[in-house]
Amino acid sequence: MREVSLRIDRYLVNTRITPNQLTYLMTVCGVLAAPALLVPGVWGAVLGVVAVQLYLLLDCVDGEIARWKKQYSLGGVYLDRVGAYLTDAAVLVGLGLRAADIWGTGRIDWLWAFLGTLAALGAILIKAETDLVGVARHQAGMPPVKEAASEPRSSGMALARRAAGALKFHRLILGIEASLLILVLAIVDQARGDLFFTRLGTAVLAGIALLQTLLHLVSVLASSRLK
């Protein structure tokens, strides 16, 4: 995406558009993934991917314009994090509603909407667990955490953390990867003529989100980040 964003930067760098305005637009694009996924069939999944890719593009552009114009602000950093939270949540909530088949002719099965929302909550909590380390250290008057402090103190926990990092299954609940997975599931479902794989994916992502929320919390507490 950097190859694309650098080409867009040249048209924006001499305009009055601010990095924060681009961040707002980035967030809107990410959130639009949810209603996009409500469009039935493969096209809804395609629109979801497009919305998330536009989010990713603008996430590159706003930072590059900020560095070029030297317009840095804590507000910009904060808005960027909000955008990341909302985009991840929007994709997973959209998946749940898609699996519930709210535009179908039959009875709406709200279980899938619940599981998608549960996955979204897990994705947000995982980000919050990381961000709250900085909050806790700041309130205690401690300096920002160093990278080495993220390593668990237990050798067994460190091995489990490396294994999880190698498998990268946790990335499936991030908006970018989840949107691509949803597209694959939609293509398979189109061939089957039902929502079996979309619903299976919803349940799997909800399970991953819950498991990762717990494991990430244990990882934080087992490391030296709060010491």
Image: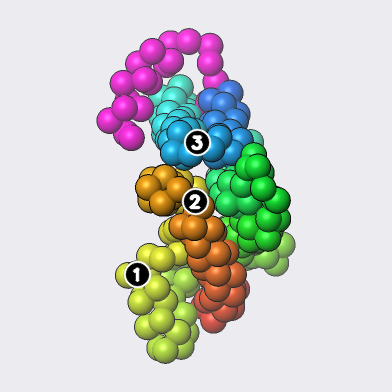
Q: CA distance from mark 3 to mark 2?
A: 15 Å
Looking at the image, which is closer to me, 20 or 87?
87
Residue range (magenta): 1-20
Q: CA distance from mark 1 to mark 3?
A: 29 Å
Give the residue number, with chain letter if any, for mark 2. Answer: 194
How many marks overall?
Answer: 3
Q: Secondary structure at mark 1?
A: helix
For residue 82, what is the image quadrant? Answer: top right
Front: mark 1 or 2 = 2
Q: Earlier in the sequence, mark 1 or mark 3?
A: 3
Seen in the picture, residue 69 relative to 148 is either above or below; the reply is above
Question: Label 2 sits on what residue type?
Answer: Asp
Q: Position of residue 177 (x, y in %)?
A: 42, 50
Crowd class of label 3 (few under 14; some 14 to 19; many from 20; radius 10 Å): many
Give the residue number, with chain letter if any, for mark 1. Answer: 167
For residue 90, what is the image quadrant? Answer: top right
Q: Secondary structure at mark 2?
A: loop
Give the residue number, with chain letter if any, for mark 3. Answer: 44
Give the position of the C terminus as an image quadrant.
Answer: bottom right
Front: mark 3 or 2 = 2
Crowd class of label 1 (few under 14; some 14 to 19; many from 20; radius 10 Å): few
Question: Label 1 sits on what residue type?
Answer: Leu
Looking at the image, which is closer to me, 193 or 179?
193
Residue that lies at the very extreme toward the left in this rendered image: 3
